[in-house]
Image (tube, rainbow, N blue to C red):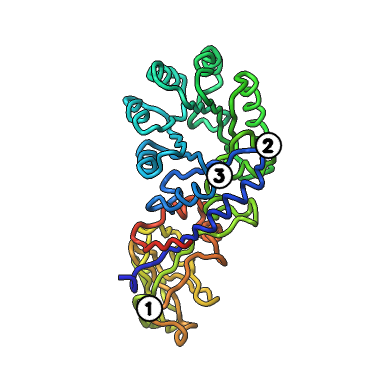
Amino acid sequence: MKYSTPSLDIDLNAVKHNYLTIKKICKKSEVCGTVKASSYGLGGRNKIDEKLMKSGCKRFFVANINEGIFIRKKFKKIIINILNGVNRNEEKILYKYNLNPVINSISQLQSWLKFIKNKKKERMVIHFDTGMCRLGIQEKDIQKVIKLKSHLDQFKEVIIMSHLACASNKKDPFNEIQRKRFEKIKKQLPGFKYSLAASGGIYLGQKYHYDLVRPGINLYGGSRSFNKSIKHVVSLKSPIIQINNLKKGETAGYSRTFKAKKNMITATIPMGYADGIGIRLSNKGFVHFKGYKIPMLGRISMDLIILDITKLKNKIKIGNFVNVYDDKFTIDDFADLTGTIPYRIITCISKRYLRNYKN
């Protein structure tokens, strides 16, 4: 029932705009699409993958095999790279669906080369760890990779990549430390393509762009502080399903964390921490209605939030929608309010919301 369900609006044209904006910045580099976690929580039925593809994106990055297969079943010609690499007994399924594992260790490289030995050698992506200590071939194994260069040269395309740890902070000196480490690897393994920058790295300057960039959150309207030309993509609103009177001295919500200092009018909306709304917003969060800021009262529940509408008692009624975030109070703003990052805000978006994709 639409009347009592929160609604998520996703602007696909804004996604296209953001992709093309990044292309203008990275004129000499190919712009890939990072669409892991179902396009950071917004993808649903391949809508964003399709929009990016129609905008000119030919190469995509996802986290794991299941994500890759889901996209491959609909799109046969695009290049899909699996960031988590090739792990035990995964070689055949990767090859079957034409998925490129991002090689993250010397053992992965050796096993993949062995598997692919008598097969068509199209593409290879090798990830080197330059400072994240998460995934990637470490410095101690670089010489082992160099010894295998003759095998790598048999591939139609080889991409050498790494990932920046502090790209969200332009002033962090570790960005340049990582870039110099990457440059050293580039010199040791010449003649290939290279990729270092994701969303934040793009705005560190052209020397970070190399042959490919891999934007993620920027495509979806997050981290707009990088570039004010990036458009807002996702808006969340919720209907009011009940209005109550709260008398002075009475309490609201679990554990009675809010006590009324005066007679009040409250409203209840059908969303909560099960929908990705952080419980830390209890007694401090707010939503908006026609320019008014409406405080959240009491503890956030699994499925419900209580609002203080005392000042709006004659202006708001059951069935009216309040805005959680939109183009005026963005996912970046909501992340700041929640004490988290925009990545988490959208990747935790509830599957219970109605999703409206707008072209």
**Residue under circle 2?**
173
Horizontal side, residue 143 vs residue 314: left or right: right
Give the spatial CA distance, label 1 vs label 2. 51 Å
**Residue under circle 3?**
215
Label 1 vs label 2, nearer the camera: 1
Looking at this view, is 7 or 264 the one in front?
7
Horizontal side, residue 22 vs residue 352: left or right: right
Image spot of residue 351 (x, y percent): 35, 57
Looking at this view, is 76 or 231 the one in front?
76
Q: Earlier in the sequence, mark 1 or mark 3?
A: 3
Q: Is residue 141 visible?
A: no
Q: Residues within 10 Å of mark 1 (few under 14, many from 20)?
A: some
Q: Earlier in the sequence, mark 2 or mark 3?
A: 2
Image spot of residue 225 (x, y percent): 63, 54
Looking at this view, is 50 or 129 the one in front?
50
Q: Are marks 1 and 3 in contact (CB under 8 Å)?
A: no
**Residue under circle 1?**
319
Q: Secondary structure at mark 2?
A: loop
Image spot of residue 197 (x, y percent): 60, 38
Judge whether 274 appears above or below 315 on screen: above
Q: In the image, what residue type sits under mark 1? A: Gly
**Residue name at image x 34 percent, y 71 percent:** 2
**Residue name at image x 52 percent, y 60 percent:** 334
Quadrant housing the N terminus: bottom left
Label 1 vs label 3, nearer the camera: 3
Judge whether 165 appears above or below 220 on screen: above
Give the spatial CA distance, label 1 vs label 3. 38 Å
Q: Residues within 10 Å of mark 2 (few under 14, many from 20)?
A: few
Image spot of residue 345 (x, y percent): 47, 55
Q: In the image, what residue type sits under mark 2? A: Pro
